[in-house]
Image (spheres, coloured by chain):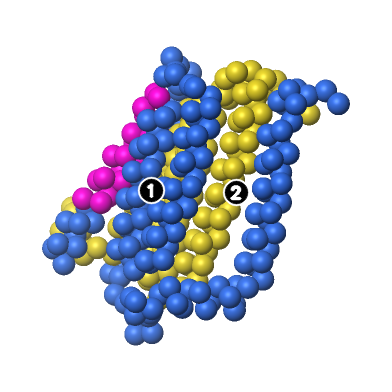
Chain colours: A blue, B yellow
């Protein structure tokens, strides 16, 4: 119990620190690298919650593929550290931070009013079996959604190639 | 008055609180940064926070429907990152910078 609490608070501090660094460092490349660390921390949080397959997919898809895409595009642009990387306006900035803090406060209030302990129910999946059950569920109950997702990915792949090949960027004349 | 017992017993509430804090950081990134790519990173941060709460609720409920939803959200997020970065490349070709203030000059 005690070790679990210490591990959770260390993980939470790690995640909050690195996600704060993502939004506060002026260099976009450093933001991307801190985001990789945040993704890896979230993968270990998923592992703690008994979602081994999701943790693996998080590492492969997010920390691997998506962040490589981000870093590659940043390298392509050759962006230096920006002089003014935050939006101007003290009052509007304060309002933006306050609205985000309101969202966080709502979540914290909801969390405080629902202090239950994560005990595994009687019918829960045993740890080694989660991936098998996930696969069975994905190919039976959610088969239609899975196929639709494949079609969506095909459309997105074609659309991305079409958008990035537009001559003259967004101001192309036809 | 903080209850030490409730703080030490790690439960659903702790994970939801962590998820809410990370979500608000992503929201601040989208609203306050000027670089389009960092704004997309903020969107990724928000989607990841929601994934964390999905997995925590799936453990609470004792079934795997939340895991399926996380799987779908990850696929959509990868597609969204691809489209967003393609748009950023298209903006960069014209203006040689990826700053949100150029988005007011888009035509068609």
Q: Main secondary structure of the magenta part?
A: helix
Give the vertical position of A111 relative to B33 (above or below).
below
**Quadrant into which the C terminus of chain B falls:** top right
Verify CB contact (< 8 Å) between mark 1 and mark 2: no
Q: Residue A68: x, y in percent? A: 47, 41
Image quadrant where residue A172 sits: top right
Residue corresponding to mark 2: B79
Measuring from the top left, give residue B4's x and y in whole percent. 15, 58
Residue at screen point 65% across, 61% down:
A150
Is residue B37 at all visible to an observer of this figure? no
Query: Which quadrant holds residue B91?
Result: top right
On the same chain: label 1 and label 2? Answer: no
Name the residue nearer the viewer: A161 or B35. A161
Chain bearing tag 2 is B
Q: Tell me residue B65's x, y (percent).
A: 50, 71
Would residue A19 appear left or right of A78 to someone viewing this image?
Answer: left
Q: Residue at 63% of width from left, 36% of height from top?
A: B86
Residue denoted by label 1: A39
In the image, the segment drawn in magenta is: A10-27
Farthest top residue in view: A83
Parent chain of label 1 = A
Regarding mark 1 in the picture, which secondary structure is present there? helix
């Amino acid at each position: 119990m005690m070790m679990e609490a210490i591990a959770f608070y260390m993980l939470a501090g790690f995640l909050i620190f690195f996600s704060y660094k993502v939004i506060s460092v002026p260099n976009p490349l450093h933001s991307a690298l801190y985001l990789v660390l945040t993704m890896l921390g979230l993968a270990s949080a998923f592992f703690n919650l008994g979602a081994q397959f999701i943790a693996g997919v998080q590492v492969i898809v997010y920390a691997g593929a998506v962040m490589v895409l981000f870093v590659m595009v940043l390298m392509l642009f050759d962006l230096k550290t920006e002089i003014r990387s935050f939006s101007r306006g003290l009052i509007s900035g304060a309002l933006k931070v306050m609205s985000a803090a309101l969202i966080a406060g709502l979540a914290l209030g909801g969390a405080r009013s629902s202090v239950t302990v994560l005990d595994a129910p009687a019918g829960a999946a045993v740890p080694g079996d989660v991936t098998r059950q996930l696969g069975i569920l994905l190919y039976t109950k959610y088969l239609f959604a899975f196929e639709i997702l494949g079609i969506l990915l095909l459309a997105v792949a074609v659309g991305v190639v079409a958008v990035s090949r537009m001559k003259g960027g967004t101001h192309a004349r036809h | 008055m903080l209850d030490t017992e409730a703080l030490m017993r790690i439960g659903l509430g702790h994970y939801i609180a962590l998820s809410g804090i990370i979500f608000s950081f992503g929201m601040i990134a989208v609203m306050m940064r000027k670089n389009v790519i960092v704004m997309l990173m903020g969107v990724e941060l928000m989607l990841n926070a929601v994934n964390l709460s999905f997995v925590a609720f799936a453990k609470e409920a004792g079934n795997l429907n939340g895991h399926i939803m996380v799987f779908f959200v990850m696929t959509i997020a990868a597609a969204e990152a691809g489209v967003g970065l393609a748009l950023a490349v298209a903006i960069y070709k014209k203006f040689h910078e990826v700053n949100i203030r150029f988005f007011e000059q888009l035509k068609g």
